Amino acid sequence: MKRVYLDNAATTPVRPEVVEIMNLYMLEVYGNPSSVHWFGQEAKKGVEEARERVAVLIGAKPEEIVFTGGATEADNLAIKGVAEANMKEGTTKHIITSAIEHHAVLHTCQYLEKRGFEVTYLPVDRDGLVDPDDVRKAIKPNTILITVIMGNNEVGTIEPVKEIGAIAREMGVAFHTDATQCVGHIPVDVDEMNIDLLSLSGHKMYGPKGIGALYVRKGVRIRPILHGGGHERGRRAGTENVPGIVGLGKAAELARMELPERQARLTRLRDKLIDGLMERIDEIQLNGHREKRLPGNVNVSVKYVEGESMLLNLDLAGIAASSGSACTSGSLEPSHVLLALGVPPEVAHGSLRMSLGWENTEEDVDYVLETLPGIVHKLRQMSPLYTRRGECACTTKK
Amino acid sequence: MREVYLDHSATSPIRPEAFQALQEAALRDFGNPSSLHRKGVDAERIISEAREVVAGALGGEPDEVVFTSGATESNNMAIKGVARALSRYGNHIITTRIEHPSVFETCKQLEEEGFQVTYLHVKQDGMIDLDELREAIIPGTILVSIMHVNNETGIVQPVVQVGTLLKQMREKITFHVDAVQSFCKLPVLPREWGIDLVSVSSHKIGGPKGVGALFIKKGTKIAPIILGGGQERGLRSGTENVPGIAGFGAAVKAAMAGREREASELDALRRRLIEKASAIKGARLVGAVEGCAPHIVNLSFPGLRGELLLHYLEERGVYVSTGSACSSRSRALSRTLTAMGLTSDEAVGSIRISLGWNTTAEDIDYACEALAACVAKLAALVRR
C-alpha cells in the first residue's frame, strides 16, 4: 500500500545526515561536556559548533542560544523565566498573549495567572491574525512580556511578529515568540523581527526529538526552571544531550542551505492540495490565512463529517494526517484555535490538518486528492446531518 | 596508545542494545505518540514498552514512571513539584550536604522562594546520621530528599532505614531519592522501601543522553514543572523523545538482565583497583571497601593536585575525573568531600575513578600502572 506521511507539523522524519552526526557523538565522542578530558572537551566542541549553527539560522549570536529538552520546555523557560525575573512582592505583573497559542504557552500563562499574574489573551480575526494595534492597546505600565506564536501549528497562519516586536521594543516590553513551526521552514531573523526570546524545536525541522532551544537576546533577564550543575551559562542545568544538540545543529545547517528551495517547493505542493480539495469537495472551508501561511500547512473543515472519522479512513488508505494539533488530538474538545477563529464547534469537529514535509511529492498530493473526496462522500452518506441538511438550517447557524 | 575510559559516573558509552533500539525508533518509528495514525500508534507502543521496563526495574507499575529530559529535570520536578503541591501543609524540606547540584541548587532556589531547608551533615564515613534526621523533622516537614549513592565517593546512604523512619511519622512526609548512581547497579525498590519518588538517568547506565525518568508512587501529590500538551498524564508536557526513551528502555533491559552478574563483576574490578592503588605511595581511599557502590572509587593523594593527576593520566590514555563532572569546572572544593571532613589538601588531591558496563580487568591493571607512574612523576615535581 502507498504510504503518505502528512503530519509533519506533529513531527518530521529525521534526516540521514542528522542521524549520521548523532551516531558519531554517541559511539565515539561520548564524553560529558563538563569533563575536562578529551572525551569531554571534544563533546563540548560539538555542542558549541551546533550552538553556532543554530544561531546563524536565526541571525543570533551563539551565546544567546540555550539548549533545552524541546520547544515545550523552551516556552516554559521563556515565559516563567521572564515572569519570575520580574516578580516583585506587592506588585502584579502583566503578560500579553494570543488566543491561539500552543498549549505549552497557553497553559504556562494560565499557571502564572494562578500565581497572581495578570494575562491578556488577544483575540484573532477569522484568518487567525493578531492585530498589532490590539497589542499596543493592551500594553500597560506593568506589562513585562508579550508572547505571540510566529506560525500557528494548527491553522498555519503566520503572525505579524515583526510589527508586534517593533511595538514591544518601542514600549520596552520583552517579546517572545514560539517559532517551532517556522524555524527551518521560513526565513527567521531575530534582529530584523525585533524578537527578544524565541523557542524552536529539533523534531519539527528534520532534527531529533528531545531537543530544542531558546534564543535569549543579550541583556534579557530570565530565571532558570531547571537548577543544578550550572550548564548553559546557568540558564539550564543538566548534562547536555550531546547527540541531540549536534543533531539539531546539523538540521539547522541543512535548513539554512535548503530554505529557499524547501519553502518554494512546499508552498507549491500546499497550494496544489488546497486548490484540489476546494475543487473536488463541496461545503469545505480552508482554515487560516490563504497567503500568510506556513508552507506545509493545509487545514480544512469539511462540513457534516467528523474529523476523526476522516482521519481513521485516511489512515486505512495509508495517509497519516491529524485533526487539530497532535497534542490535543486525543481529546474530544474542539480546538481552541479554531474556536478563536470563529469556526462554529460543529464545523471545527470536521477539521483535518495535513502538513507537508521534504519527503512529500506531487504524487503524494495526487493520491490524497484521489482518496479524500471518496472518503468524504462515503462518510456523508452515513451522516444524517448531511442527508437531511436541506430540512434544517440550524446545523451551522444559530 | 591504549585508551581506558573510567569516567562512567560522568557519562557511560552507549550499550549496543540501546544504540540499536534508538536507531530503529529514530529512523522507522518517527511518529509523534500523540498522533492517532499508525505512525503515532507505533511510537506510543515503543514508549509503553520502555515504560514497563523502567517500572519493572524499580519494582513499580508502568503508570508510576514519567519520562523526562534527564535526571536533573527529574530532581527538579520531584523537589519543586512536591514543594508546590504541598506548600499549604508546610514549607520545610530536609536534604543533605552531599547531594548532586540538581538537588542542592533546587533546594537553594526554594529557600529563596520562602521554603525552609535543613541540610543534614554526614559523618566521617560519608553517611548521614539517622538521629540527626529524626530530630530535624518538624510538623511542617513536607519532603525529605536523600541520594542513594553519592556520585563522587560511591558511599551508599541508608535510604531503607530512612524510609522506615519516615513511615513511623504521624504526618505523611514525601520521600525522594536521587538514584542516578545506583539504578541498575544496586537494587532500588521504592515501594518496598517507603520511597515515594526516585530519579534515574539513562546515560549513566549505557543509555542515550537527554532522557531520564521520575518514578512517582501512586497517590503521591506532585505538580508538573513543564506545562503544555499534557503528555505523560499531564505531569510532563512536550513531545516524547521516542528514540531516547526507546534507547533508555533497551539499556535498562540489558543492564537489569545481567544486573547481579554485572554488579559482582564491577565490584570485583573495584576491589582489584582499590588493592592495587592502595599500594601507591600516599594514596588514601575516600569511602570504604565494604558497603559501597560497585563502580566508584575515590582516591586522594594529599599534597598533589587531582587536576594535574587527571591530565597526566590522560596523556597515558586513562580518563578519570576530579569530583563530579558537573562541578569539575569550578575551582571550589568538593562539597561532598569537605562535608566528610577532608582537609583541603585531601580534597584537592582527590580523583574519581568510575567503572561501567564495558570495563575489563586489563583496563584496571593498565590504569593502576599509569596511576602509579603519574603519582610518582607528580610527587617528584612537588618535592622539587
Image: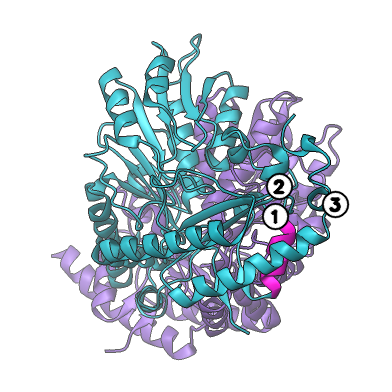
Dot 3, crowdedness within 10 Å: few (<14), some or many (≥20)? Answer: few
- CA separation in Å, label 3 and label 1: 16 Å
| The disc label shown at residue A307, or none | 1
Residue B88, image x and y in percent? 72, 23
Of residue B247 and residue A141, the one placed in the foreground of this image is A141
Q: Mark 3 falls within which chain? A: A
Residue at 19% across, 63% down: B382
- CA separation in Å, label 3 and label 2: 16 Å
Q: Is residue A10 visible?
A: no
Q: Mark 1 falls within which chain? A: A
Residue B28, image x and y in percent? 55, 79
Residue at 72% across, 66% down: A312
Three-letter amino acid code of the residue under disc 2:
His
Residue A92, image x and y in percent? 50, 13
Q: Is residue A27 above or below residue B149?
A: below
Chain A: give its colour. cyan
Q: Is residue B2 above or below residue B129?
A: below
Q: Is residue A217 above or below residue B300?
A: above
Q: Is residue A187 magenta?
A: no
Of residue B305 and residue A278, the one placed in the foreground of this image is A278
Q: Point out the tag, 3 or 1, that comes first from the N-terminus.
A: 1
Q: Nearer the viewer, mark 3 or mark 2?
A: 3
Three-letter amino acid code of the residue under disc 3:
Pro
Q: Magenta region: which residues?
A: A307-316
Q: Is residue B345 above or below residue A265?
A: above
Q: Are marks 2 and 1 in contact (CB under 8 Å)?
A: yes
Kindly identify which residue carries mark 2: A349
Q: Are marks 3 and 1 in contact (CB under 8 Å)?
A: no
Q: Which chain is purple?
A: B
| Quadrant housing the C terminus of chain B | bottom left
Secondary structure beneath dot 2 equals loop
